[in-house]
Every structure is written in C-alpha cells, then in structure tokens.
Image: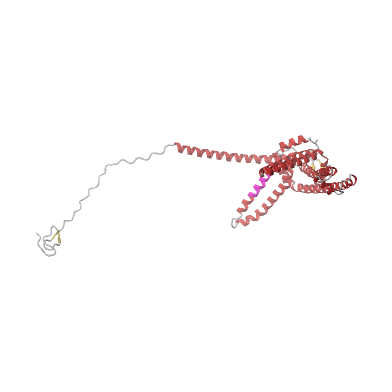
Amino acid sequence: MNATRTDIPGQPSRITFMSAAASLIEATNAFRNVRAIILLGLTFVCAALVVALFGALGAAIGSVAIASLGGLLGFVVAFYGANAVGILLMREAQGEASPNILDAVTTALFSSHRVIGVVLLQLLIVLAAVIIVSIVLFICKVPLLGPLLLTVVFPVSALLLGVLVFALFYVMLPLAGPAVWSGSTAFQTIARLNAIARRKLIPVILLEVALFIITMFTAMLIFTVVFIGLSMAGGMSAAIIGMGSTSFGGMMNGMNFGGTGHMVAASIGGGILLAIAAVVPGLIFTKGMCIIYLDVTRDIDFDQSETSLSEGLAAVRKKAGEARDKAKEMAEQAKTAASSAASSPAPAPAPAPAAQDYQAPAVEPVPRPALRSLCPNCNSPVASDDAFCGNCGFKLR
C-alpha cells in the first residue's frame, strides 16, 4: 500500500499524517526480505556463540574479565549485524535494489559508529540542559528575588526537560539508525534529527505508537499461526510416524536426546521455525522506523537546519579558539616574565652615605661637689671650707 502524497510544483512532496500511518502497513512485508531474515538470524546466532564461548572460557579459568569481554564482543556483533539489517530494509523502503549481505555488512562496519556518536552527543545535550537548569534553580535560592524567579523558571525548565527527554527517546534514539542507514553523515544526522524534533515531534510519536501496535498485532498473529501449525503437525506426526507424543511440548522434549531420531529432527525443525517467527517482528519494526523517517523528512528542507548548525559549531569553534589563544598568550607572558626575573641580576644594595667630620658640641664641666671630711671632735661630716663644726662648734681652722 503506497501512501498518498501531495506534490506541489517547486516544493518538496508533502505527505499527510493519515497517509503516513497507512504507509506503515508496508512494514509488514518485511518478512519477504529473505536476506534480512538470514542476516538477522546469523547475527543472533553469532552473538550468542561469542557470549557462550567466552562465558565458558571465563568459567573454566575463573576469570570474570574474560566473560565480560565476551559480553562486550557479543554486543558489538549484534550492533553491527542489526545495522546491516537496517541498511537492507532502508534500501527496500527507499524502493532501491537491496544489496547483498556482504555489501550490507561492509557498509555497516564503516558507518554504524555514527549512530553511537549521534546518540552520545544527544545525551550530552540533555545532560547540559540538566546542568543549566540546576544552576538556574540554585540561583532561585536568593531571598526575595528567588521565589519570583522560580515562578517563571519552574514551568519553563519543566517544559524544556520534558521536551528534551521525549525528543531523546522518541526521535533521537529510534531515528538515529534510519538516518545513518539512509546515507547521512554524522553532522547531517544531528541536523536532521534536531529539525524533526522541532517541527514534527508529535506526529513522530503518534506514528511510532501506531507502528508498535501494528508490530505487536502482527507478532501475535504470527505466533498464533505458528503454534497452531506446530500443534497440528506434531499431532499428525505422532499419529503417522509414531513419535510417542501428540503434544508440541512432548516434541520439544526430544531435545534431551532421550527421544527417537524423528523426535530430534522435529524438535530442530520446530526450533528453527520459532526462531524465524521471533525474528519477523523485529524486521517489521525496523522497516517501520525506516518508513517513518522517510515520511517525516520528505517535506522538510534540511539546508537551513544544516546551515544553522554549521554556523553554531563555527561560533563554538571560534570561541574555543579565542579562549585557547588567549590562554596560550597568557601562559607565554607568564613564562617570559618568570624567565626575565630569573635571568636579571639582583639589584646591588645602595651604598652607605660617606662619613662626615663631626664635631661634638663643647660640654661645660659640671662642678663637682667638695669632698667632705669628719670633725675631729665629734666625727660629724663637715665640708672642706667649713671653719667650725656645725654639730659641736669645734674650730676646724
């Protein structure tokens, strides 16, 4: 089912919301992409084998690091394999010829890292917004002015954080993969996702809800058909071949190697069918996200978004360059001042003033008191110029 688009001469083709929602029905055809099914199945098998192998090796030697390394490598295998599947489904959604598995894997190896970079950058943007809001709320602790400021800051910060989180989980994370799979660079992906978040956040959320409902309903139908078929085929096999059990659960018990060869063969075949049934809903959801991305970007002019983002990055680089040059200049000035201070000799102390002839002022001699003697009669002290003793009247001269 093709969506109905409105084409206006001189303008990009436009697509209505209802036609975009109807185009999601095309995602149910993902089960026809045999290459995507094979590649996704191989991805899951290889990732599980890597995790199991390193887990067994880590348990054998008692190393948690080996088991953790296996988990990391398993994630890497699953990540690049899922991106290769996304590339196959994106080419199908674009109406182009689907590449072979090797080309898809090669393209994923050289482009999937952009998805991680875009996601990390968007997480940093949300973190920066949280820090800014925290600083503003801290300013609101100021007495008198703080409550008045909080009246405006609180609703604005709540709206800002809510929009950022919704944009992160409903636009940035789900659509980062389709943007990269369509051939966009990391810079183009960021610009396009930001434009989608600003202009079509609500339509994207509604389309994703519709895709989730379609995927769940399709998965329910697929597993219902598979379980009904397995139950009937198992009962007929038990009656005709004589495997010993007419139930599907009994057929699955043949994997314990206690059953006959027919039981083991039926168990392997049933397991493969269940694995394929489990893979198909993932393919439907992935192709649906590719269709949503193509529909919401069809009538958006990204030149302005890319230009504004480029100008913003250029301004940030300019500010950073100016700050770096200023810091370098200040460091050089400090280094020059330090080297000049170390190389210049210490200033000689000022010479002491020359001694001048100094003549002390003449000092008049202090009259010394006359020495006293004793009266020969009464031994009382008398002055040297006394004629008589002042005590007994004895004549001294």
x, y percent for residue 369: 18, 56
x, y percent for residue 16: 80, 45
Quarter of the image with the C terminus in it: bottom left
State how the image is colored: secondary structure
Main SS category, magenta section: helix
Q: Please state if 234 lies on the left or on the right of 152 as rendered.
A: right
Total numbered circles? 0
Q: Is residue 130 above or below residue 183?
A: below
Stretch of the chain drawn in magenta: 122-131
Residue 304 in view, yes or no: no
> Is residue 46 inside the magenta stretch?
no
Nearer the observer, 335 or 260: 260
Quarter of the image with the N terminus in it: top right
Q: Is residue 83 above or below residue 130?
A: above
Most extreme residue toward the right is 240
Which residue corresponds to the image point at 62% horizontal and 57% vertical from the top-left? 147
Q: Please state if 342 lies on the left or on the right of 200 as rendered.
A: left
Nearer the observer, 36 or 389: 36
x, y percent for residue 134: 63, 51
Most extreme residue toward the bottom is 392
Residue 256 in view, yes or no: yes
